[in-house]
Image: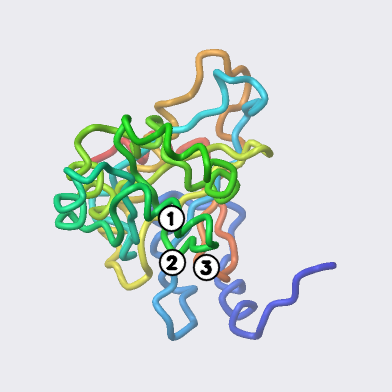
Amino acid sequence: MKKKHGKKYYEAKKLIDKPMYGVAEAVSLLKKTATNKFDATCEIHFNLGLDPTKAEQNIRTTVSLPHGTGKDVNVVAFVDEGKIKEALAAGASVAGTEELVKKILDGWLDFDVAVATPNQMKELGKIAKIIGQKGLMPNPKAGTVAEDVVKMIGEIKKGKIELRLDKQANLHAIFGKISFDEAKLLENLKMIIKTVADIKPSTSKGNYLKSISVSLSMGPSIKLDHNSVVSESKEK
């Protein structure tokens, strides 16, 4: 069934009068499509010429956005008793392992990111399926498993996000709020595009960046000229 949109959506869509845009032009247009009163999230969507079933092409990495995401990220930390205080001081909403595992087994999943120290990973076996299905399982590739829990939490709070390919070879990320000025949105967006371009697997053949688009949450899609966005994103 075709998704129905409201009047404001179609008003915003009328502003998109070209098939593709450059990065800076797209950010400027994105601002103009903001017809809602709430502070909408800015999103970027890639379709990549990769085969997610091949381990070497199932890309997963992180990127630190220069200006953060604009979202207050709720982080929980799986740490031993000796690190609970420092994890909480760094910004974790809940820290520990035994009590945290019990809460999750009881159905609590009110958090955005989970981090863990390596020595606590074995304890997560009881909840691996629960949090794994939600994409919340700590993983070294996602920058969420390390000894330095303070550094991990601090980076996530400041705007470090995960970039992960899905089963359809799509990659989705957020790069700020529409209340950000254009310069900040542009810097964040360029950082994501450059990161995705730089991690192209050596085994990828043919067209790697098949399509790239940006949009606001619940807003119309603005397609980027994927033949020029990489060079534009490397410009200072």
Decide which of tag 3 and tag 2 comes sooner along the chain: 2
**Foreground: 209 or 169?**
169
The amino acid type found where label 1 is placed reads Ile
Residue 122 location, x and y as percent? Answer: 43, 32
Position of the N terminus by quadrant: bottom right
Circle 1 Cα neighbour tier, 10 Å, few/some/many (<14 / 14–19 / ≥20): many
The residue tagged 3 is: 217
Q: Badges 3 and 2: C-beta atoms under 8 Å apart? A: yes
Res 123 → quadrant: top left
Res 229 → quadrant: top left
Decide which of tag 3 and tag 1 comes sooner along the chain: 1
Instruction: State the colouring used for the structure image.
Output: rainbow
The residue tagged 1 is: 174
The amino acid type found where label 2 is placed reads Thr
**Foreground: 167 or 88?**
88
Q: Badges 2 and 1: C-beta atoms under 8 Å apart? A: yes
31 sits left or right of 159 in the view: right
